[in-house]
Image (tube, helix red, strand yellow):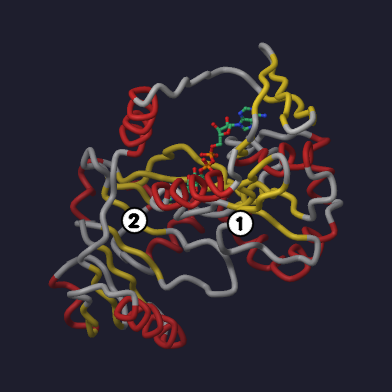
Amino acid sequence: MRQDYRATASEEIPALKNIFERGHANGLNGLRWLHQSQIAEYEPHVQGLAAVYVPQTGIVDYTEVSRRYAQHFQEKEGQLLLGERVLDIQAQGTQSRVITTQRAYTTRLVINCAGLYSDKIARLTYPSISVKIVPFRGEYYELVPEKQDLVRNLVYPVPNPNFPFLGVHFTRMIGGGVEAGPNAVFAFRREGYRKTDIHLPELWEALTWPGFQKVARRYWQIGLGEMYRSFSKAAFVRALQKLIPAVQSADLLPAGAGVRAQACDREGGLLDDFAIIAHEPAIHVLNAPSPAATSSLSIGETLAQMALQRNL
Ligand SMILES: Cc1cc2nc3c(=O)[nH]c(=O)nc-3n(C[C@H](O)[C@H](O)[C@H](O)COP(=O)(O)OP(=O)(O)OC[C@H]3O[C@@H](n4cnc5c(N)ncnc54)[C@H](O)[C@@H]3O)c2cc1C
């Protein structure tokens, strides 16, 4: 699977050059700078002023990857307990008592990887932590089968460097279909997978977080644009047409959504890197946005090293 970043406006060219140079600096071989007329060699239906061809990019069946992680963990005698919600963590000397909806566990170390609720779990052992998770829903469409040949591989726009999310893009999936999206819409509840999902206490918590208010002031235009695009398929299609002009509204069917757990600090910074902190008696993964799934083995290694350093 290959990936192309397309610049569709001249002011995007410097950012595209930056992506190209960073790719080289990170040791990617075979990167190719494509002039306008060369784009069709890879993606005949895509238009742009220039593009970068990245031969190394791929996609995986992440459900299967997760299953394998679980299997390896269990083969090493790890015990996987599902369907329990952590309610509280209490200090007990050098140990912790983790209380869930089912029972209580005593442990020497807690590693918190609770995604959309990671800040809440972190506050149980580190109440003054100054990070809040703000949920951003990413909605997708998929191309109808007759139009899937509009896209051969993965096609990305040049990301806006001021915003932590990639723009809407095309992804050829492992099973052959093509997804288009995701947008990035502020969600009215943490697990707000549908437009109508709303949870007033969670919404209030996000809106009153000083950092979020600063984010809202800084990005209100982008935010409103994303909200509009969420409700207007025509606006979503227009964004996709910047990459593939032939895409039409009738070619796209709604295809579900995910919610990003984006950490926001008190000063209004949307953390754009992974954030992992060790604070007795726990290690908290506080920000693991995309590409944290891709980086999961490396993040796991970092966590294992941090755990081993604790000399438990
Ligand atoms: C639309 C979208 C597209 C993405 N695309 C990509 C991509 O192309 N590549 C990529 O690398 N990444 C991508 N990501 C990001 C990726 O999904 C995340 O980085 C990754 O899932 C983070 O993993 P995590 O284990 O930290 O959190 P999660 O995967 O969110 O897992 C957290 C888990 O903790 C559980 N939990 C929460 N609270 C509690 C509690 N109180 N008690 C017990 N359990 C709890 C949750 O149920 C969940 O199972 C995308 C994300 C979205 C939303």
Residue 299 horizontal/vertical position (percent): 47, 51
Front residue of 65 and 60: 65
Q: Quadrant of the C terminus?
A: top right
What residue sits 17% from the left and 75% below the top? Answer: 30
Residue 31 horizontal/vertical position (percent): 22, 76
Q: Is 59 displayed left or right of 297 in the figure?
A: left
- The local secondary structure at tag 1 comes to strand
Question: Which one is earlier in the sequence, the residue at label 2 or at label 1?
Answer: 2
What residue sits 24% from the left and 82% below the top? Answer: 33
Q: CA distance from mark 2 to mark 1?
A: 28 Å
Front residue of 113 and 13: 113
In the rendered image, the vertical position of residue 105 relative to residue 121, given as above or below: above
In the rendered image, the vertical position of residue 274 relative to residue 309, given as above or below: below
- Label 1 belongs to which residue? 275
Front residue of 49 and 252: 49
Q: Quadrant of residue 146?
A: top left
Q: Is 178 displayed left or right of 112 in the figure?
A: left
Q: Is 294 displayed left or right of 167 in the figure?
A: left
In the rendered image, the vertical position of residue 211 relative to residue 35, given as above or below: above
The dot on residue 1 is none
Given the image, on which type of amino acid does mark 1 rest? Ala
Marks 2 and 1: which is nearer the front?
1
Residue at the far front: name it.
Answer: 311
- Label 2 belongs to which residue? 170
Residue 229 horizontal/vertical position (percent): 56, 55
Q: Is 284 displayed left or right of 52 in the figure?
A: right
What residue sits 28% from the left and 75% below the top? Answer: 27
Query: How many other residues sit within 10 Å of disc 2, few (<14), some (14-19) or many (≥20)?
Result: many
Given the image, on which type of amino acid does mark 2 rest? Phe
Front residue of 287 and 154: 287
Residue at the far left: name it.
Answer: 41
